[in-house]
Image (cartoon, grey):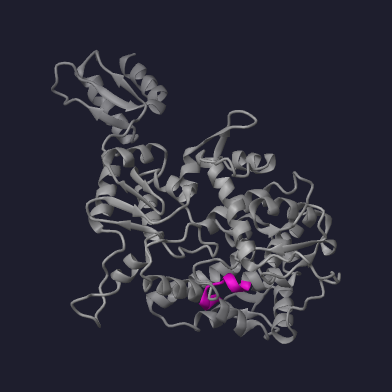
Amino acid sequence: MNVFDYLASKLPAPALDRLYQNPWTVQAVFRSLPPLAKQYVMRLIYINNSIPRQTIDVWVKNDSGSQSRHKAAVARLLALRVLTSATKETKEKEKNKVVYRLNSNFEQQLRQALCNGPGRTRWTKQLPPDKHRPTMEQLDEYAQSAWESILHFMVGHAGPNQKTPSKGVVDLLVRTKLMQQESEDAGQITNDGFQFLLKDIHTQVWTFILEYVNTSEQRRMDRDEVLTFLFELSFLELGHDYPVEDLTESQRVLLTDLREFGLVYQKKSSSPRFYPTRLAINLASGMAHAADIAPAAATATAAAATSTSTAAPSRLSLAGGSGAGYIVVESNYRVYAYTTSALQIALLSLFVRMTCRLPNLAVGVITRDSVRDALKNGITAQQMIAFLQQHAHPICRAARDVDHDKPYAKRSAPAVPETVCDQIRLWEAERNRVTYTNAVLYDQWPSLQVFTACEAYAREAQVLLWSDPATATNPRLVVLQSAHDIMRDFIKKRTA
């Protein structure tokens, strides 16, 4: 779940209407909409009257694909209350006619942004020049270090120079059920935590942020102010400083916690300014369809693919996408990780048996035992495959699209060999051959007629799991444990 799913499913209508009084929230929500939904908003933004549903329905073709996208777009707009529906009485036979209209607050703020720009009046405090202004590279390094310290803590591979997360971060890990608290200084990662580690960084960040928003009222913080500040962070400029004085009390508390996650940078806690990092700027715009991220990621991947260097970046991708990968998987299940990051090797070792470690290369092999250990920890086969594909080396991605026999042809060979993907799925299927169900066994029947009647009754009630043939010497019947009471009452009635 991302923040926009949270708005659509968790917030009541009055809370959404209040949020749409903020221009940054409106722009972030509009940017997240599907293309067809954006087009509907632009068509309706300067229409001051309600529009009948039948009018909007004819805007698309009558084929199944178009109708499906149309219904999805309208449903998304209604869920986010960008579009509101009402019934209108008419003189025709249809007394209750459904009409749509844009949310008035949303419409007003979007008009303002389109015509006059969003404005920057919020940041009124003039700050003196920062003598120790961090560079963009330093901001990226700070964000990576802060976030990786949390992941290192989870996998238990924190080095001597690794910063230990604060008590508030550890409590958040426990509340999100990613870890179990064993003592004040130690915790045990859960099955959900193992799955969390293999997700992309954008999903990981939002897991924490949404839990933080859910518990904001318990912290005596204004939830609306927390959400609006998170949206506003997405529109700030990387490398630019902003005054803390212009923030509300709730947002200052949030700023302190965001510093722990690496979303903002402050030289010290009492500093009058803060710098948003790339993690914060991509917070609401780091989706896969973000237009400002995809070209940069594609350019970086293409440039890396043409490089002859074997060393891959040792950091995670701050853009929330796959970035430049570092993993090469061969069809013989051998895995090569071109990285110097202990964290990336630790994540890979969750389902790969590591056999060799060089200064910029780690070698391992995917085995049945290593995959089964990962499955026991709650990691699914699809998550393992997705992790390998997401972090595949750029050379593997380039080879996927190039057929050396036909230079101008394309082929769909995957970055991870299909034999490896299929075998991981088969190893997972081995564990699903037997399922365990709590049940009750009935035998030593007084007569064959009673057994036959009870078998028919259990089958009709859909609680029958297994039974012997009716001609067996000692018939046996197995039903769900939850049906034991009704079966016992039925047997008493038949034998009374």
Q: Residue visible at 70% across and 53% down?
A: 259
- Along the line of sight, the residue nearer the viewer: 8 or 409: 409
- 102 or 109: nearer the viewer: 109
- The image position of residue 187, as x and y in percent, is 57, 33
Residue 330 versus residue 24: which sits nearer the camera? 330
Image x and y of residue 239, in percent: 68, 69
- Vertical position of residue 292 compared to residue 143: above or below: below
Q: Which residue is drawn at 49% across and 42% down?
A: 192
Q: Position of residue 12 (x, y in %)?
A: 68, 57
Depth order, front residue of 41/409 = 409
Can residue 83 be seen here? The reply is no
> Which quadrant does the N terminus fall into?
bottom right
* Residue drawn at the location 54% of the way across and 59% of the way down: 202
Q: Say whether residue 100 is visible.
A: yes
Tally of numbered discs: 0
Task: Determine if the magenta segment contains residue 34.
Answer: yes
Which secondary structure class fits the magenta region best?
Answer: helix
Q: Where is residue 132 in the image (x, y as percent from the top left)?
A: 75, 64
Specify whether 25 is left or right of 482. right
Q: For residue 182, which quarter of the picture?
A: top right
Residue drawn at x 45%, y 63% as measured from the top left: 322
- Magenta segment, which residues? 30-37
- Is residue 244 toward the left or the right of residue 291 in the image? right
294 versus 451 height, above or below: below
Residue 77 lies in magenta, yes or no?
Answer: no
